[in-house]
Amino acid sequence: MRQRDGFTLVELVVSLVIFAFGVLAGAALLGTGHKWEGQAELETQLTVAGEMKIEQLKAIAGTDLPDTVALVPGGGLESNVAGYFDAVEIDARTFRRRWRVEPGPAGTRQVVVRVVPLIPPAGGRAELWTNVIHE
């Protein structure tokens, strides 16, 4: 029997097919990773927009000013109610914020803020709540 050096044509074709599947899988993984990164960025921006509104409402509650419409119980999360919605831009994206204020325990106000992106196809939303001391 004679010993040959090198690869046969069949071995070469099989190895190229395996390599091609690996490259295609890697490319698909990169695309998915990019999509996840974009979704994570959007979720961060939604949360930041909600936290900004909660901090604004806490600042109003911490002043000696008479009660303003921002802390009067009312508002809604499903539709725009005058004095209980606004829009904010973060990193060139615009978000709509709606909030609801309800009486809370022991002289507090429970505040719920919902944030949604205004421009499709961005999907998702954030909903944050807190109790604000308001005497």
Image (cartoon, rainbow, N blue to C red):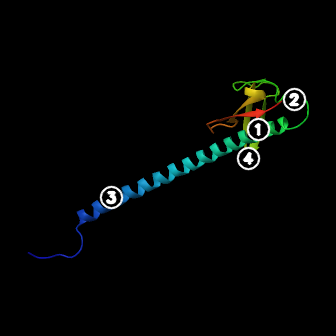
Quarter of the rendering occupied by the C terminus: top right
Q: Residue at x 70, y 44 (%)?
A: 48
Q: Which residue lies under the disc numbered 2?
A: 68
Q: Residue at x 24, y 70 (%)?
A: 7
Quarter of the rendering occupied by the N terminus: bottom left
Judge depth for marks 3 and 4 and give the one in front. 4
Judge depth for marks 4 and 2 and give the one in front. 2
Residue type (three-letter) at the residue carrying disc 1: Lys
Q: Choose top left, top right, bottom left or bottom right for residue 122.
A: top right
Q: Distance between the residues labelled 1 and 3?
A: 53 Å
Judge depth for marks 1 and 3 and give the one in front. 1
Q: Which residue lies under the disc numbered 3?
A: 18
The mark found on residue 53 in the picture is 1
Sequence order check, earlier mark of 1 and 3: 3
Q: Distance between the residues labelled 1 and 4?
A: 18 Å
Residue type (three-letter) at the residue carrying disc 4: Ala
Sequence order check, earlier mark of 4 and 2: 2
Q: Position of residue 133 (x, y in %)?
A: 78, 33
Residue type (three-letter) at the residue carrying disc 2: Thr
Residue 40 at least partly seen: yes
Q: Which residue is drawn at 70% across and 26% down?
A: 77
Secondary structure state at the residue bearing disc 4: loop
Q: Is residue 10 left or right of residue 121?
A: left
Q: How crowded is mark 3: few (under 14 residues within 10 Å), some or many (20 or more)?
A: few
